Image (tube, coloured by chain):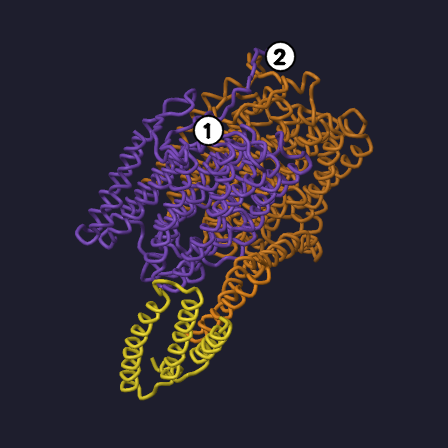
Amino acid sequence: MTKWAYSGITAVLAVVVAIWAIPDLGDKYFGYFAPLNDGTSPPMPDLSPDLFLFPVSAQIVLLTVGVGLLVQIYSTAYLGHHPRYRSYALIIILFLLAMIAVVGTTNLWVLLVGWEVMGLCSYLLIGHEWETAEARAGAAKAFLMTRIADLGLVLAILVIGETYGTYDLLGAELVASDGGAENSTAIGLLVLVAVVGKSAQFPLHSWLPDAMPGPTPITALIHAATMVAAGVYLAARMFPLYRDSELVLVALAVIAGITMLIGALFALVQADLKRALAWSTVSQLALMFAAISAGDPEAGTDHLIAHGAFKALLFLGCGCLMHTVGSSALSAMGGLRKAMPVTFVSMTIGFAALAGLAPTVGFFTKDSVLEALKHSADGDGTLPASVGQVLFYVALATTFVTAVYAARLWLIAFFGEPKEGHEAPRAMLLPVVLLAVATFALSIGQPFHLGFGLVSTGIAVLATAVVVYAWSNRGELDIDAPLLTRELDLDTPYTRWIPAITREAARLVVVVDRDGVDAYSDGGASGAQLTSRALEIVQSRNVQRYATVMTLGVIALVVAGVIWT
Amino acid sequence: MPLLYPLILAAVLFGIGVYGVLARRNAVLMLLGVELMLNAVNLNLVAFDAWLEDEIHTGQSLTLFTIAIAAAEIGLGLAIILALFRAVRTIDVDQVGAES
Amino acid sequence: MITTALSIPFGLGLLLLVFRNTVSGRVAALLGSAAMAASLVLYALVWEGRSVRVSGEVDTSWIEPLGARLHLGVTYVSWPFLLMTAVLGLLCCVWLIAEDTSPALVGLVLIISASALGVFSSLDLLLFFVFFELALIPMWFVIAWWGDPHDPEGRRRAATRFLLFTVTGSALLLVGIVWVASPFGSLQILDIKGAALGAAVLIVLGFAVKTPLVPLHTWLPDAHSKAPTVGSVLLAGVFLKLGTYGLILLGAQMLPEEFAKIAPYVATAGVVGIVWSALACYAQDDLKRLIAYSSIGHMGFVALAISTMSDVGLAAAVFGSVAHGLITGLLFFASGSIKDRLGTASMAAIGRGLYARTPWLAVAFVFGAVASLGLPGLAGFWGELLSLRAAYEVGDVLSKPGAWTLVGFAVLGIALTTAYFVRAIRLIAQGEAVPHEGDRDLNRREALVMSVLAVGIVALGVAPGPLVGLYDGPNFQGSYEAVTP
């Protein structure tokens, strides 16, 4: 069973990371060597590992390897028969290593390498089924959008290096937190570009739903533990470097506000479970960015970890459903409650966490985010109070929509006319069950906000009640909102305009290259030809004509000589 | 007799010779043009020889050389033209050039 | 040592040309590989460290009346170029170890490689120029005789076009050299300081044709696409480096004050080339042409780096040149393999699904493409990054608004580069496989050559330190102290 070998390698990786990361989970002091900013240029780049874990980084690497291991196990059953299983499994391992590099280092170059290698891995994995046009298009779109955004990170690192004289993140942050933060607007905006692309925020949000042709375990990996999580992590990690810039924070808040609402609304109208979950990720990530912009990165990363657990659960559960019904379309599902009890229970927990119902971890972390936003709305956060207030109410509205679509998806998938089906293989169920357990277990030790707990639970219960009421009255939950189904046409620039402009520009360049730039060489050639034509006339091959010319020449010379001497 | 007369005669002869070489297409006539030029030179040589009263008469002796060479040349030239005519049945230089 | 390293491939190359009918192609290629390997080892050993100004110096009289000397040596600028050239020459010879190789082709490859090595080791202007020219004519034969077998007319045309462009450039260069040397009274590159601005312009123009900078680039796509595989590799990997090396050595280092006046134009031409070539790539159908155009973009980054005239810029230029040699070498080997098999490099004719048809060949191509689009962790990235950094730091020559504008356009170029490589991968590697009778996966020889390059690309990408460290100038003083929060 060679396909288990890759799970074995991943398990070893997970154990090593666990041994490394678990001691760092607590708060700790550290001794550290940081270069001083003495006006000299930063050192030449290198890739020394410079491993270092903050408590939150330790949590994230553990989440990464945990989900990664579960995905590998899951894949043995889900994709084990695939002829290209080897490359698939190896790229997953590379993917995990890249994420660990992003989270576990203080060397910005190592971070960048991991960051972009992740983009490449997601490109390769989304395009794993490269025989299909959708997979090719989705993979290309994901790679292009994220890579263009990654250039923001490259420039951000350059600016950090020039500002702080070091490419060490910790060193730069120490200088910055000492009151020496400089260029925070430039750094912040560039980081913003990078994370907006990586985490699929407005206006670079459309690649994530279009990446759905990728294998479902990969979707789980990208949405939960790697790739999009890296965006939130980076925004939180670099927060000290741009905290001073109100412009950056307001921009982040605006982006987060727009994205969370449109993501949730798009998720509401989808006819495809996987795509709906993808939009839900976009919306949830925006919630995390909102927390960061409100000055509480901890709340953002806490929600990131909670989201990682329950979103992996939902996607892997979705994979189980697809395994049974052969499609991710909601119309193909329904009534699977009896046929797939384990999947049903696990995914119920997952949807509850998504909707923010107690006692799942989603309840606690979402309340922390709302708490942070409320602080900001009261003017206690980093945002201006007016922006904070708007953001807070948008977040509440999003919470409501989230609960609505969670309930809708749950009802359509599992209720209604009972359907024939069978439970997925054990290798697929085990990860799902473990993640369901984790969705509860992570709640332990989470901060609890009584007021917000009541408010958000009220909202979620109200939303669920509305949906259940509609379901029992109408018997179906199709929502007719063509504008939302078309996703507000926000993707048109990327699918139409930019490719068209590039194509036209490319065509123009080729034409100019051939007919324009070559003018001087072609001109030189035809000039030489014309000259030789002109001189050829003299070469008549007629000796008498030559002699005539010579005679005339002699006469002219003699005359000239006589005149001028 | 002033020097001018033979010089003018020589110049006229030379001019006629040049014209013959340059303008005529008939190979025999071109050869005649060459002969005219040679003889114009001969005339000059003799005239200057007389005018300078050269004691060893270099001009006259050179003229004898030239006459001898001209005789050889006309013989050779006519032979070539004859051979040419046998080969291509024409002694028009343009046609010969066009056919070769 | 350097003379030995040069004369082994030269001598063997000439012998192979003379005895081209008596040795078999396989033997010739084996001999050639051995010669290039010997040269590589010698050049690796000749290095005496960063602190020595000229390693392995040879300086004897040559043409006394002109003041030209046989002055060879390895400097910290030329060493990476020399090693890369020797490696590429060696790999080209290994590539030719096959039954159907012509011994004369091996001989020409050896002479071309040795001439390039000669250029990189010359410290005398006249010697530099002689070697510079010596590589041209063999290249004409390589393209015109062994080029695209399906298009004899086109390959002859491309070869002549290449020759005319580069000879014109060389003519400008020669005038420039004379202009520099005659008032100064010496041909020794390391001694010369200062010259007329016109001379610097001519020298830069001469190298700009070779590099090539837009708008002097139009010879390149034709020559690369019609040349045989080894010809393309040597053209892209080695010939273009003659241009960049010349710009560094004879431009930025020999005539710093004059070059400073020209630098903004060089930088602009480079960055225009980045965007221009990326757009041109986007519309290409011929794979080899696409890679050729992509070279213009990479050389644009190098030109930008050189024109900053800073230490970082120098590191960027050398790193970018070496990385481009390896990456484009790999890409041309891969596309050459495809062309050998299918008889065409047109992406439409190659058809989709190489991943399924020839998996390892497809992987090699995709790896090269990913390295070429500048993925961090692979060699191509650091050159581009350092170039951006050099321009961002502005340096003493460029103006800040200008340099930052150039950075912006260069970044746009990187984005477009990603786009066209993704397009190419999508067109040929991915997709429903359309089998072709020519489909064969890599044989051992091809796999060996490509894996050596791939290892080199990863090694330079993961550990840029040793190469970049050569240019960590003396003006850098980092100071560190312990911090405990």
Q: For the residue labelled by badge 2, is the local secondary structure a helix, a strand or a loop? A: loop
The residue singled out by tag 1 in the image is C190
Q: Which chain is purple?
A: C
Chain where mark 2 sits: C
Q: Nearer the viewer, residue C249 or A261?
A: C249
Q: Which chain is yellow?
A: B
Q: Colour of chain A?
A: orange
Name which residue type carries label 2: Pro
Name which residue type carries label 1: Leu
Q: Is residue A341 visible?
A: no
Chain where mark 1 sits: C
- Crowding around mark 1 (Cα neighbors within 10 Å: few <14, some 14 to 19, many 20+) is some
Q: Position of residue C364 (x, y in %)?
A: 38, 46
Q: Position of residue A279 (x, y in %)?
A: 63, 45
Q: Are marks 2 and 1 on the same chain?
A: yes
Q: Is residue A555 above or below residue C203?
A: below
Q: Mark 2 or mark 1, which is nearer to you?
A: 1
Instruction: First in sequence, mark 2 or 1: give its number.
Output: 1
Q: Is residue C225 visible?
A: yes
Looking at the image, which residue sits at the far right?
A: A386
Q: Nearer the viewer, residue A516 or C436?
A: A516
Where on the picture, by quarter, is residue C454? top left
Tell me, for residue A100, which label it has, or none. Answer: none
- Crowding around mark 2 (Cα neighbors within 10 Å: few <14, some 14 to 19, many 20+) is few
Q: Position of residue C452 (x, y in %)?
A: 34, 39
**Mark 2 and mark 1: Cα distance apart in space:** 51 Å
Q: Is residue A357 left or right of residue B15?
A: right
Q: Position of residue A536 (x, y in %)?
A: 47, 69
The residue singled out by tag 2 in the image is C485
